[in-house]
Image: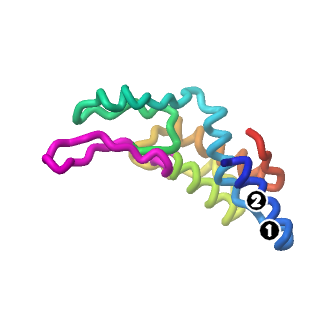
C-alpha cells in the first residue's frame, strides 16, 4: 500500500506543478524500520485467549489500539482497531505535519504526550525530522 500511495502522490504532485508532499507514510515506514523494538502482532488464537482486562503488548506499535467492549450479554470482549494510528503514530504524524507546515526542525520541540516516554518522543521526533528532510525524494520502497 505504501509503495502505491507514494507513487500516486508523486505523480499527482508532478501533474499539479511539483506540490510539496507531507511524508506521513514514509515517517511510519522509517520508524518501523529503525525502532529498536519491533512490533509483533498477536495471532488470532492468542487474541482469543485474552481475558479482561488483559491488553496485549504494544511495544513498537505505531498503528492499532486494543480495547474491550461489552457484548450483548454484558461481558467484555477484546476488540482491536488495526488500521488507525495509536498515540505513538499520532505523535509521529503531528511532528511531521508541524515540521512541514512551519518549516522547522522538530527535534528540539519539547511537547510529549502523557503516555509516551521522553526517550521514545525524542526517537519519534528524530524519525519525523528524517522524513521531513527526505520530503523531496521520498523513496517508494522502505
- 74 lies left or right of 141: left
Q: Residue at x 50, y 44 (%)?
A: 63
Q: Which residue is mark 1?
A: 19
From the viewer's side, name the closer residue of 121 and 15. Answer: 15
Query: Where does the image place residue 139, in percent across and percent down from the top left?
Result: 79, 46
Q: Return the residue found at the far left.
A: 73
Residue 8: assigned label: 2
Q: Position of residue 71 (x, y in %)?
A: 20, 48
Q: Nearer the viewer, mark 1 or mark 2?
A: 2
Region of the chain picked out in magenta, as a range: 66-88
Q: Label 2 near label 1: C-beta < 8 Å?
A: no
Task: Specify whether residue 138 is in view.
Answer: yes
Main secondary structure of the magenta stretch: strand
Q: In the figure, residue 29 lies in which quadrant?
A: top right
Q: In the displayed structure, does residue 29 sit left or right of residue 6?
A: left
**Badge 2 density bin: few <14, some 14–19, many ≥20, Cα 10 Å:** few
**Relative depth, front residue between 108 and 57:** 57
Q: CA distance from mark 1 to mark 2?
A: 13 Å
For the point 86% across and 72% down, which residue is it? 17
Q: Where does the image place residue 47, in percent across and percent down from the top left?
A: 35, 31
| Image point (66%, 58%), residue name | 99
Query: Up-down: is 5 above or below 41?
Result: below
Please state which of residues 112 and 74 is positioned toward the viewer in this rendering.
Answer: 74
Q: What element does badge 1 sit on?
A: loop
Amino acid at each position: 500500500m505504501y509503495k502505491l500511495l507514494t507513487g500516486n502522490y508523486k505523480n499527482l504532485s508532478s501533474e499539479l506543478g511539483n506540490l510539496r508532499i507531507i511524508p506521513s507514510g514514509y515517517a511510519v515506514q522509517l520508524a518501523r524500520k529503525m525502532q529498536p523494538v519491533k512490533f509483533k502482532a498477536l495471532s488470532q488464537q492468542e487474541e482469543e485467549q485474552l481475558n479482561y482486562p488483559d491488553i496485549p503488548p504494544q511495544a513498537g506499535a505505531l498503528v492499532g489500539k486494543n480495547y474491550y467492549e461489552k457484548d450483548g450479554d454484558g461481558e467484555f470482549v477484546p476488540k482491536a482497531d488495526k488500521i488507525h494510528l495509536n498515540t505513538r503514530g499520532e505523535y509521529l504524524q503531528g511532528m511531521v505535519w508541524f515540521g512541514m507546515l512551519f518549516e522547522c526542525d522538530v527535534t528540539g520541540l519539547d511537547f510529549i504526550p502523557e503516555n509516551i516516554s521522553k526517550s521514545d518522543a525524542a526517537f519519534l521526533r528524530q524519525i519525523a525530522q528524517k522524513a521531513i528532510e527526505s520530503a523531496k525524494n521520498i523513496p517508494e520502497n522502505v
